[in-house]
Image (spheres, rainbow, N blue to C red):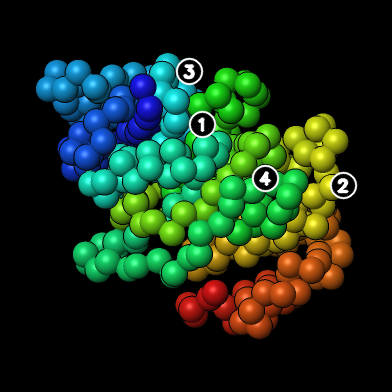
Amino acid sequence: MRFSVIVPVYNTREYLSASVSSVLGQTCGDFELILSDDGSTDGSGPLCDALATQDSRIRVLHGPNTGAGRARNRALDQAQGEFVLFLDSDDTLVPDALERLDEHIGRTGADVYFFRLRRITAAGESIQPPEAEAGGPVSLSQDPSILLRWGAGAGGALWRRALFESRSDIRFGPWRVGEDLYMTRRMLAIADSAVQLPDVLYNYYIRSQSATQGSLDGGRDVMAAMDGILDWYRREGLFARYEPELCALCVLHVLVYASWRVLDMPGSGPVLDELRDYTKARFPLCRRNKYVRSWPLSRRVNLRLLEWGLYPVLRGKSRR
């Protein structure tokens, strides 16, 4: 079997059928679809079971509500495909996504394939991603910058399942936010080769109730995930080799992205202070980092405002 498509499901009954249909309607039929119900309470679980009766390629797993990361991990233990793709239960694949990925596999034989996501707003507006040039096959040791440049989320990538079998310690984390960063940034270190594709294969729907919209706890989740990444690179003897990339990764995902997610929430000041202090404690010289120094001026200005604790200046404004 070529593909295992893994879908963690939690209280998305309204969108689940469309997500499943986008997989079942693929022009490449060599796949299994694993729906991993994460203790849904809105009827999503029974809907998963009903959908499975309609197509033998669907398998359903039921478990307690422990978060999308652990729901994906449960499905990984049961997956049989040569490659694994993760799809959120309120998102969809383009109709020929698997066929196009199969063609790329045949041409390159890489372990990991990153592709582009189209964002769709709550109002139905489709936002095309920026143009991206194809890259690879390349390993992290050959180009350490891919740790920063190529997709950090669960969606937007295809993974050779043998990678997960070879390292049982590399799985999604237990947090609500940052659980995918924790997996993808470590998995890149053991992959023999990765490819960046120009193809837009995934429709990502921006919904106000999405877990990625976050809460104040989300910032602390990202810090825990980053600690897990840094500790793993140290244990593997890889920290010194990739310290510049890990530093920039920390600044980007902890101080920049996590801060932006909580910045406009009431009572965010203490969490923003924690994010700033966390980054400074682990990488006190981060402003000298070659990647950080190359960022656009607007981002570097916003970074400085965060470091100075001038949160009111940033609140309610566009941030990049």
Closer mark to the observer between disc 3 and disc 1: 1
**Disc 3 target residue:** 77
Q: Assign a secondary structure to mark 1.
A: strand
Q: Which amino acid does label 1 sit on?
A: Arg
**Disc 1 target residue:** 160
Q: Which amino acid does label 4 sit on?
A: Ser
Q: Which of marks 2 and 4 is nearer the N terminus?
A: 4
Tell me the distance, in whole angstroms, between the alpha carbons under discs 2 and 4.
17 Å
Q: Earlier in the sequence, mark 2 or mark 1?
A: 1
- Determine the residue positioned at 78% across, 39% down: 233
Which of the image's four quarters has the N terminus?
Answer: top left
The image quadrant that residue 39 belongs to is: top left
Tell me the distance, in whole angstroms, between the alpha carbons under discs 3 and 1.
14 Å
Asked if 291 appears above or below 32 in the picture, the reply is: below
Asked if 29 appears above or below 110 in the picture, the reply is: above
Question: In x, y percent, where is residue 150?
Answer: 57, 54
How many neighbours does mark 1 have within 10 angstroms: few (below 14), some (14-19), or many (20 or more)?
many
Residue 116 shown left or right of residue 272 in the figure: left
Q: Which of marks 3 and 1 is nearer the N terminus?
A: 3
Q: Which of marks 3 and 4 is nearer the N terminus?
A: 3
**Disc 2 target residue:** 240
Q: Which amino acid does label 2 sit on?
A: Ala
Question: In x, y percent, where is residue 250?
Answer: 71, 55
- Determine the residue positioned at 22% across, 26% down: 48
Closer mark to the observer between disc 2 and disc 4: 4
